[in-house]
């Protein structure tokens, strides 16, 4: 079985492995596919991902087999283009590119023009008849190869170029002539020799293998690791290498290079979208060195730009390109992100892939493509990443709020964000780590900034276009981004910057509007998002296809209202302790906790009863007849205790007891391990009057509802044994009867438990004999099963994920193989004991798509998620049902 696949020319593209992105990477698979459907693709070959893993395993050795296969594949390119690699008279040049199964910005940058040396550059000059082009290509090659393969600081090359331009009084690269480039090549070679202690490699085969080696090595680079960690990409995918004959966009004014999307990746609008540059090569368009031009006339006019669009400047090549766009969209049935080059009027395709898009665009495209008959409703549902919806659910800038606009750049990634200015990725991560909202402001971003971009609320750059690194990555991450705001000048050392005429410092608050490209001083007011339109359409489709219900975790009327707006079908978890923290009641709560005896507690509880009753009445009012699961008090009492002398003094004044007395009592409540201490149902067992008060408040509120009464589901936390549950269920039932007798009205209710201890899961059959529902409290179940405290896990969890001990943070995404077993087993045993037992999940995991799919598979009735996660859960549940 070969691990080198040729494409283009006479290649047959028949091996199914060449279509498999896991084998040849996304770039390799799509290059072969484009060649197979007859598009103009320069010939080349792909070295499969398995060779990368083998190479890393073998500590950098290549097999003889691989060397032979590469030689044969190189011969295929030579035959197809009629040039030989290293031929001093008419050299074949190639590009070397990485390409994993999924697109990974952390990977090695592409090397272009490989195969140039002091001899072949003369041949290239003679054949092209253009010395300027040949020497420009050679200096680009040394620069790229020097930077990415030999590890020479790229700043050195940039400085040398600046100096060369200054010396000659030139402003732009395009003004450099052939002698200027030739002189610069000499300078570049000197820089390389000085940096690495040997000459720039002249042997073209050494060049090629050096580049292949660099691609493989980059798979284990720091930035690739960071990217994989942030995006849950497994290491054992490996990367492929693509070697491809060069075509030249820098052969004068009939040549060009560009990037394009078949639809607008920011809005989803059905219009070609992209940027291009005349007489340019490779990454010039995205590197921000020259300002790229618009692809279409319409886009140019809309932006009021002067330089001609490709549609106007190169109508024939543009016509070829738009035919390719349509063909590719129909072929892949998805929006494509395309890279192309025009060499002396002829169009060449260098890459296509399904394009990254904002959530808004993803929704619009999915809904539009169903209308266009390109895909069906089910596929539309499955195409949307549920987590991406998050972008649409958060507030946007209030159009009526005043805006103190500092400057305007390109609307690179939509959405709005406010935060403190930070000038580098490390600071972004640090400040965000201590809970601050930050906006990362950079001249331009690079893959080393990924972690800072992730930590930031928004990204602002001084340079770079709509397809710059910052723009593409921000859109992928769902961060608002304004790019190319050229009125910004940053002084990193002073931690300060100028925006337009205004001086700002790191730490000053700004707001960016990634949809309008605006940068504003201070924080601008926001409004709630509008969830109609495409969003509503897709959600309706999702609801038609899902089996599981989606509830919400909420305890205030405002949260309940928001969740219902997002489509919640009930409350899966109402945490009563949040009500205890309310400033107006905390003192009664403290009085209750610090009481010396039952009478003292009863007096304090009597103050709390009407407050709790009012809370529940408000919730029942908002929820109408929807089910509401209310959890009785769960956390250890010490969480409510006063902090500091002032609060103790205040409480002493309120209760008429001495500060010493109160402090002593507080000391008695101290626990060594509160997570496993006096909490949950253990409070109900030892202080039954607390649970009795809460149950009373619930029933009184339910009975007072006008019209159809709600069916409260009372949930007892942290049950480990059936006996605990029996005692507390009896307490709840007794309280219910008292309330019903007093008021003369009865309501239906359920009493159930949270399953959050391994013992409860194991004994689920026994407990279900008494409990009418289970709700899996997977936060605690994860803590207690793993023996890991969530609040202390931060110190080691990152390492655990990095070293692959956990695939993902088990508090974010359920540990399906471990904790999941307990959930599944408890569900089975529970249902066996009580057919029809109602089952749900209310941990953080209820909003995580992978965990939701698991809940669907094992037949839970519902998941419960925080209000903003409700639409995510609806979509994830539908996807699970469809897959
Ligand atoms: P990335 O994954 O960062 O997009 P690519 O491997 O696609 O990197 O290469 C970046 C750019 O290099 C491409 O957009 C294209 O313009 C240029 N390029 C790559 N291979 C060739 C080639 N064979 N001929 C001309 N340009 C090329
Ligand atoms: Mg690149
Ligand atoms: Mg590319």
Image (cartoon, helix red, strand yellow):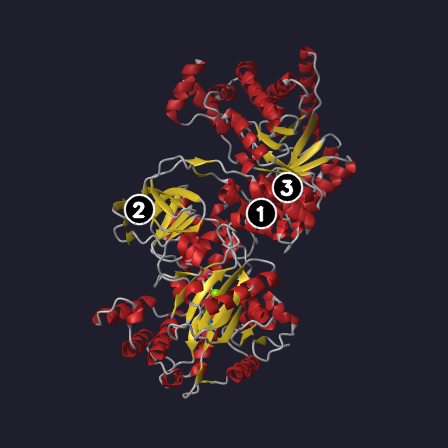
Q: In this view, does 395 lie above or below 209?
A: above
- Dividing the picture into quarters, in which one does residue 130 lie? bottom left
* Residue 506 circle label: 2
Q: Nearer the viewer, mark 3 or mark 1?
A: 3
Question: Considering depth in this image, is 577 or 853 the residue closer to the camera?
Answer: 853
Residue 546 in view: no
- Camera-nearest residue between 865 and 829: 865
**Where is residue 58 drawn, in percent x and y?**
53, 73
Q: Counting residues from the N terminus, which is met first, the one under dot 3 or under dot 1?
A: 1
Mark 3 Cα-neighbour bin, 10 Å: few <14, some 14–19, many ≥20: few
Comes first in the chain, label 1 or label 2? 1
Q: Crowding near pointer 2: few (<14 within 10 Å), some, many (20+)? A: many
Query: Cβ–Cβ below 8 Å for labels 3 and 1?
Result: no
Residue sitting farthest toward the bottom: 89
What residue is disc 3 on?
Answer: 540
Q: With respect to residue 723, does 223 lie above or below?
A: below
Measured in 3D between alpha carbons, the distance from the residue under mark 3 to the one under mark 2, in whole angstroms, is 45 Å
Q: Is residue 677 visible?
A: yes
Instruction: Name the mark nearer the viewer: 3 or 2.
Output: 3
The circle on residue 386 is 1
Between residue 563 and residue 544, name the one nearer to us.
Answer: 544
Secondary element at image label 1: helix
């Amino acid at each position: 079985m070969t691990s080198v696949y040729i494409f283009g020319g006479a290649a047959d593209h028949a091996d199914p492995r060449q279509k498999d992105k896991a084998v040849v990477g996304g770039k390799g698979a799509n290059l072969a596919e484009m060649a197979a459907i007859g598009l103009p693709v320069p010939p080349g070959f792909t070295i499969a991902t398995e060779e990368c893993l083998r190479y890393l395993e073998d500590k950098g050795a290549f097999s003889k087999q691989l060397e032979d296969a590469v030689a044969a594949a190189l011969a295929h390119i030579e035959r197809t283009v009629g040039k030989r690699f290293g031929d001093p008279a008419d050299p074949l040049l190639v590009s070397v590119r990485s390409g994993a199964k999924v697109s990974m910005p952390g990977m090695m940058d592409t090397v272009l023009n490989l195969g140039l040396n002091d001899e072949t550059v003369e041949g290239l000059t003679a054949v092209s008849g253009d010395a300027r082009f040949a020497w420009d290509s050679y200096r680009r090659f040394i620069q790229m190869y020097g930077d990415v393969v030999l590890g020479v600081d790229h700043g050195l090359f940039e400085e040398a170029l600046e100096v060369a331009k200054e010396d000659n009084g030139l402003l732009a690269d395009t003004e450099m002539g052939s002698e200027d480039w030739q002189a610069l090549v000499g300078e570049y070679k000197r820089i390389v020799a000085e940096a690495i202690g040997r000459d720039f490699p002249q042997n073209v085969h050494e060049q090629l293998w050096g580049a292949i080696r660099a691609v493989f090595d980059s798979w284990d680079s720091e930035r690739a690791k960071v990217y994989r960690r942030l995006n849950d990409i497994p290491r054992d995918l490996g990367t492929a290498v693509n070697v491809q004959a060069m075509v030249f966009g820098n052969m004068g004014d009939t040549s060009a290079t560009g990037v394009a999307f078949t639809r607008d990746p920011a809005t989803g609008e059905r219009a070609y979208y992209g940027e291009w540059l005349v007489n340019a090569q490779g990454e010039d368009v995205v590197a921000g060195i020259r300002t790229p031009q618009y692809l279409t006339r319409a886009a140019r006019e809309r932006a009021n730009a002067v330089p001609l669009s490709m549609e106007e400047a190169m109508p024939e090549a543009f016509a070829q390109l738009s035919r390719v766009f349509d063909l590719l969209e129909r072929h892949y049935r998805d929006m494509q992100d395309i890279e192309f080059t025009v060499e002396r009027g002829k169009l060449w395709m260098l890459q296509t892939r399904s394009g990254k898009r904002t959530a808004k665009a993803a929704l619009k495209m999915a809904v539009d493509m169903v209308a266009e008959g390109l895909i069906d409703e089910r596929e539309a549902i499955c195409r949307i990443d549920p987590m991406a919806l998050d972008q649409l659910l958060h507030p946007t800038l209030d159009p009526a709020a005043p805006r103190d606009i500092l400057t305007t750049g390109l609307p690179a990634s939509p959405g709005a964000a406010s935060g403190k200015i930070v000038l580098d990725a490390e600071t972004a991560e640090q400040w965000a780590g201590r809970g601050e909202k930050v906006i990362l402001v950079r001249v331009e971003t690079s893959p080393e900034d990924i972690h800072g971009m992730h930590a930031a609320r928004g990204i602002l750059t001084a340079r770079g276009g709509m397809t710059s690194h910052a723009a593409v990555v921000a859109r992928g991450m769902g961060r608002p981004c304004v790019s190319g705001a050229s009125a910004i000048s940053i002084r990193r050392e002073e931690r300060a910057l100028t925006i337009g005429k205004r001086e700002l410092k790191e730490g000053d608050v700004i707001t960016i509007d990634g949809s309008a490209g605006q940068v504003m001083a201070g924080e601008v007011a926001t409004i709630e998002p509008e969830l109609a339109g495409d969003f509503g359409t897709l959600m309706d489709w999702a609801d038609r296809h899902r089996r599981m219900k989606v509830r919400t975790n909420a305890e205030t009327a405002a949260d309940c209202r928001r969740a219902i707006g997002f489509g919640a079908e009930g409350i899966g978890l109402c945490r009563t302790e949040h009500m205890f923290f309310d400033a107006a009641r905390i003192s009664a709560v403290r009085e209750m906790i610090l009481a010396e005896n039952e009478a003292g507690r009863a007096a304090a509880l009597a103050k709390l009863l009407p407050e709790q009753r009012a809370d529940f009445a408000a919730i029942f009012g908002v929820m109408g007849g929807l089910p509401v699961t209310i959890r009785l008090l769960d956390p250890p009492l010490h969480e409510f205790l006063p902090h500091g002398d002032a609060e103790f003094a205040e409480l002493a004044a309120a209760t008429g007891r001495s500060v010493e007395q109160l402090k002593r009592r507080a000391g008695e409540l101290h626990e060594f391990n509160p997570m496993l201490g006096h909490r949950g149902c253990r409070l109900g067992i030892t202080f039954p009057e607390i649970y009795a008060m809460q149950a009373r408040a619930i029933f009184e509120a339910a009975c007072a509802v006008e019209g159809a009464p709600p069916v409260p589901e009372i949930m007892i936390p942290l049950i480990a044994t059936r006996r605990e549950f029996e005692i507390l269920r009896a307490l709840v039932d007794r309280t219910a009867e008292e309330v019903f007798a007093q008021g003369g009205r009865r309501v239906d209710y359920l009493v159930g438990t949270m399953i959050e201890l391994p013992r409860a899961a194991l004994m689920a059959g026994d407990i279900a004999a008494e409990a009418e529902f289970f709700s899996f409290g997977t936060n605690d179940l994860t803590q207690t099963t793993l023996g890991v405290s969530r609040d202390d896990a931060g110190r080691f969890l990152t390492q655990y994920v990095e070293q692959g001990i956990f695939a993902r943070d088990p508090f974010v995404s359920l540990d399906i193989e471990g904790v999941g077993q307990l959930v599944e087993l408890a569900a089975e045993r529970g249902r066996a004991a009580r057919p029809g037992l109602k089952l749900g999940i209310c941990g953080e995991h209820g909003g995580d798509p992978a965990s939701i799919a698991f809940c669907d598979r094992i037949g839970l009735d519902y998941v419960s998620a925080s209000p903003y996660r409700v639409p995510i859960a609806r979509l994830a549940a539908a996807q699970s049902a469809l897959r």
